[in-house]
Image (cartoon, rainbow, N blue to C red):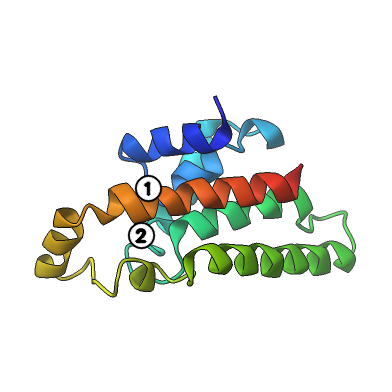
Amino acid sequence: MKKSEKAIEFFSNNFNCAQSVLAVFAQDFGLSEDQCLKISCAFGGGIGRQQLTCGAVTGALMALGLKYGRGLKDDNQKKAETYQKTVEFMKEFKKKHGSINCKELLQGLDMGIEEDMKKINELKLHDTICVECVKDAVEIAEKMIS
């Protein structure tokens, strides 16, 4: 099963967008899926359902951080490389979706407003837009990591 398919499976089983993206990279970095699900849980719905940066984006950036990020024994070049990869990822994601902002991706609808949430559900935006964001975030990150 492809990583993007597994991510969609996580998302379809009530894990949020950030969790669904990061968890599929767990094995690549010696982490458990459970650890990744817990680490990324707060980032779903645009960071705690505030609809800021898309959770699929933040999940992918965490995976890029695991690959390229600066640790205790690394020099500052690792940080610069991570920032460069972040910019590259964001450009690619924006090219595909027009934004990295959760609220913008969800047609300006606010998950914190009951009427808007009903509209999001009626339009099945989580099943269409969010699923595409999860799939694309995984595929972009996977390409950058390999």
User: Would residue 122 appear left or right of 39 to someone viewing this image?
Assistant: left
Q: Amino acid at mark 1?
A: Asn
**Rendered-image quadrant of the N terminus:** top right
Position of residue 5 measured from the top left corner of the image (x, y, whole percent): 48, 33
Mark 2 Cα within 10 Å, few/some/many (few <14, many 20+)?
A: many
Mark yes or no: residue 38 visible: no
Position of residue 78 measured from the top left corner of the image (x, y, whole percent): 84, 61
Residue found 42% across the figure and 38% down from its top: 8
User: Would residue 1 appear left or right of 81 to someone viewing this image?
Assistant: left
The secondary structure type at the circle numbered 1 is: loop
Q: Amino acid at mark 2?
A: Gly
Position of residue 58 measured from the top left corner of the image (x, y, whole percent): 53, 59
* 91 or 83: nearer the viewer: 91
Position of residue 64 measured from the top left corner of the image (x, y, whole percent): 68, 53
Residue found 46% across the figure and 68% down from its top: 53
* Label pair 1/2, CB-CB below 8 angstroms: yes
Residue found 33% across the figure and 37% down from its top: 12
Residue found 15% across the figure and 68% down from its top: 116
Q: Earlier in the sequence, mark 1 or mark 2?
A: 1
The residue singled out by tag 2 in the image is: 45
Mark yes or no: residue 109 visible: yes
**Most extreme residue toward the front, as rendered?**
96
Mark drawn on residue 35: none
The secondary structure type at the circle numbered 2 is: loop
The residue singled out by tag 1 in the image is: 16
